[in-house]
Amino acid sequence: MVELLQRKVFSIVLGIILMFTVMPMAVYADIGPKPSVVIDFKGLEDEKYYVTLLSEIASTGPHSALGEHPGNQRYHEGDEDYEIWEKLLSYQDKDGYYFLQYFGECSETAQFTWGYYPPPKFKILIYFPAYDQFAVSGEAYERYAFHSYYSTDVKGLELESITPIENIEAVRNYDYTWELISLLARIIATVAIEVLIALLFGFRAKKQLLLIGTVNVVTQSILNILLNVINYNQGSMMFVFNYIWMEFLVFVIEAGVYSALLPKYSGKDLKRRWLIPFYALVANAVSFGLGLYMAYLIPGIF
């Protein structure tokens, strides 16, 4: 029986090792995730347009207003989109917001993404080359999360107006429903995995399984809610960092609770009590490994 259990545990641990061995990892000099701003546009399906974010500050990361740093001009005569750059450069914002020389054509995607050091506070500026017309948001917006999503419906703009349009409005577009669904899915999956491993370790009494399930619901709910908050505000790198020590803390708590209570609910004398903390270690290692793998395989799951 002991030999069979050892084989099962060895197979589980070996599976985790192999999973991380075959998982492809890309290495970059600047590997950390960066904040981003994503804006979806509606109502401009038949128009060609370029989008940028006007910044409250003159520099953010590698992006800066022309002349802010020596030699920071990003486009020169003959470059593709040089004329668009010139037009955006010529725009004078009434509140003094800066053009940081980053922009993109959004005609086909209907989406603008500033994925590397976007300005913390910004206005949305659209340029329509066919009309030589600007449209700008009437108010400034902020990065409200590590990855901030906005949506704007700009249907019905008077593009032939002789003055810039200044009434664009955007709304936050973060998918909280998906966040809730993925949160519940992770909790359910973790509880199921740890109960299954408990069966492999021989903890089959109903009260034992009920205890393990209850403890996991509590610890995993707290863990996943905290990780969601961290990921929302600080991004995936801090998520992984906190995931490691939080999962270890969960192991310590669960090992203590199980060691104190599981023997009481056993139908027979539990001689190998060392199996209890070992079970907690294996169960949490498996759920931790699968959690990281899910985050890698399906980035949106966290």
Image: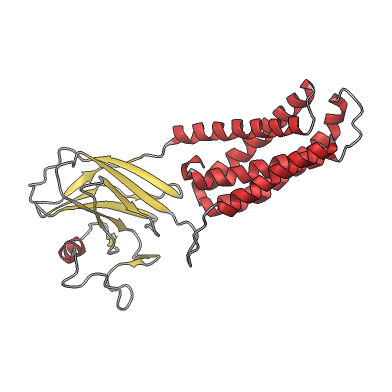
Task: Answer with the quarter of the image where residue 222 lies.
Answer: top right
Picture mark count: 0
- Residue 110 percent location from the top left of the image: 25, 45
Does residue 46 show up?
A: yes
Q: Which quadrant: the N terminus?
A: top right
Who is closer to the viewer here, 69 or 301? Answer: 301
Above or below residue 57? Residue 127 is above
- Residue 224 percent location from the top left of the image: 59, 39
- Residue 72 percent location from the top left of the image: 30, 74
- Does 131 sit left or right of 231 as displayed? left
Task: Answer with the quarter of the image where residue 294 lies.
Answer: top right
Who is closer to the viewer here, 237 or 127? Answer: 237
Residue drawn where x is 18% and y is 63% of the image: 81
- Does 258 sit left or right of 74 as displayed? right
Does residue 253 show up?
A: no
- Residue 18 percent location from the top left of the image: 62, 50
Who is closer to the viewer here, 14 or 302? Answer: 14
Residue drawn where x is 92% and y is 34% of the image: 271
Name the residue furthest bottom.
70
Residue drawn where x is 27% and y is 41% of the image: 152
Who is closer to the viewer here, 291 or 102? Answer: 291
Here the colouring is: secondary structure
- Does 179 sit left or right of 85 as displayed? right
